[in-house]
Amino acid sequence: MRWLRVCSVILVVSTLGAGAARPARTAFPGKNGLIAFQSFRNGSSQIYLETVPPSPVRRLTRGKHCYALPAWSPDGRRIAYEYNPSPTGLHSNDSDIYVMNANGSFTQRLTRVLGFDGDPTWSPDGKEIAFESTRSGNSDVWVMKADGTNPTDLTPRSPEFDGDPAWSPGGNRIAFTSARDGNREIYLMNPDGSGLLNITNSPADDFDPTWSPNGQLVAFVSNRDGNLEIYETNDRFLLKRLTSDRGLDAFPAWSPDGKWIAFSTDRGDAGNRDVAYMNSNGDGNGVTELTQAPGWDQAPDWQRKPVSPAVGPAPAHAPANRPHKRSPTDLNQAVACMGNSR
């Protein structure tokens, strides 16, 4: 995740390296619940909750550490996230994936090997988590059991950046960002890494895929029109632009009922990012701002409202260690942890 100011040229450069995870989200069908998001409003990046209509935000994490890229589980009861003990993400190889209950309790560490691990996304049955990792010596898309065991590299043959995974609601495909063709494109693959399909095919940079709850559309961010905007496409290459503004529009996340898309934007407040939402058809019918804070608010993810509010502890299995290589970019900062100070 990003960035220096809202200059798209700087953004593109700053997000190509390891530790540059950006949120890729999956909307699981159901009634709309809470929105989890990442905010720098109190200094270091922390995870907060917001509602629609907006209410006073609730903070889930504490301490001078970096908590980033929250991802709701399919049942709406747990949140996976990226954690780095440094407030600014220094060094990216200290980033790991954790999971906590929806109220911030019962935190559990899922990864603990050298290399950057971040940007988690759940399978629709809640049994697996796909994520971005440099443990192989290169940024690849990996998958593991939801307790952190059995990690498997899904993109081992690509020498370039592969990351930003997003699992389809039907479970049969994973969308991700890849630079294997020289610039960032959105690809689809089967959950075992087979069946690669480039669905953007643009000379511009396309990234941050997120699935609609019916599994028919993939929203993403692109600079193809000279500014960072949100688009949608599908495996038939039908393209639609959803936002049109001089500011930054990024980090799209569908609501579980499919009617809305939450996103991060600095429209109306250049240089500062807030979370807003729009009709899933685009911003032509207006945008509603959900947060207002001097620190960046970004990376929203929309909860599927749980059938029952009951919250239990996360599984207590220890993650399995696995042979690894140190990535040459692991000494970089984890970009998700870098906020307004850049």
Image (cartoon, rainbow, N blue to C red):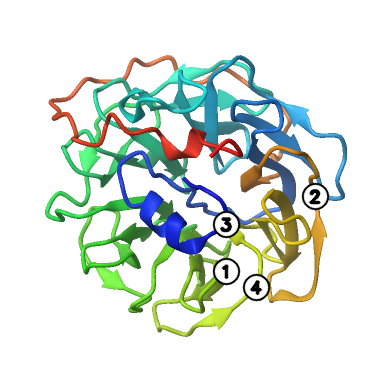
Q: Position of residue 269 (x, y in %)?
A: 76, 55
Mark yes or no: residue 170 visible: no
Per the image, label 4 sits on a secondary structure element best described as loop
Amino acid type at image mark 1: Ile
Nearer the viewer's eye, disc 4 or disc 3?
3
Mark yes or no: residue 146 visible: yes
Amino acid type at image mark 4: Thr
In the picture of the structure, the residue carrying the numbered disc 3 is 6
In the picture of the structure, the residue carrying the numbered disc 1 is 230
Q: Which comes before the other along the chain, label 3 or label 1? A: 3
Q: Residue at x 57, y 15 (%)?
A: 106
Say few, some or many: other residues with alpha carbon within 10 Å of mark 3 (under 14 / 14 to 19 / 20 or more).
Answer: some
Q: CA distance from mark 3 to mark 1?
A: 15 Å
Q: CA distance from mark 2 to mark 3?
A: 20 Å
In the picture of the structure, the residue carrying the numbered disc 2 is 290
Q: Which comes before the other along the chain, label 2 or label 3? A: 3
In the picture of the structure, the residue carrying the numbered disc 4 is 243
Left or right position of 238 against 140: right
Q: Residue at x 33, y 50 (%)?
A: 163
Q: Residue at x 77, y 29 (%)?
A: 58
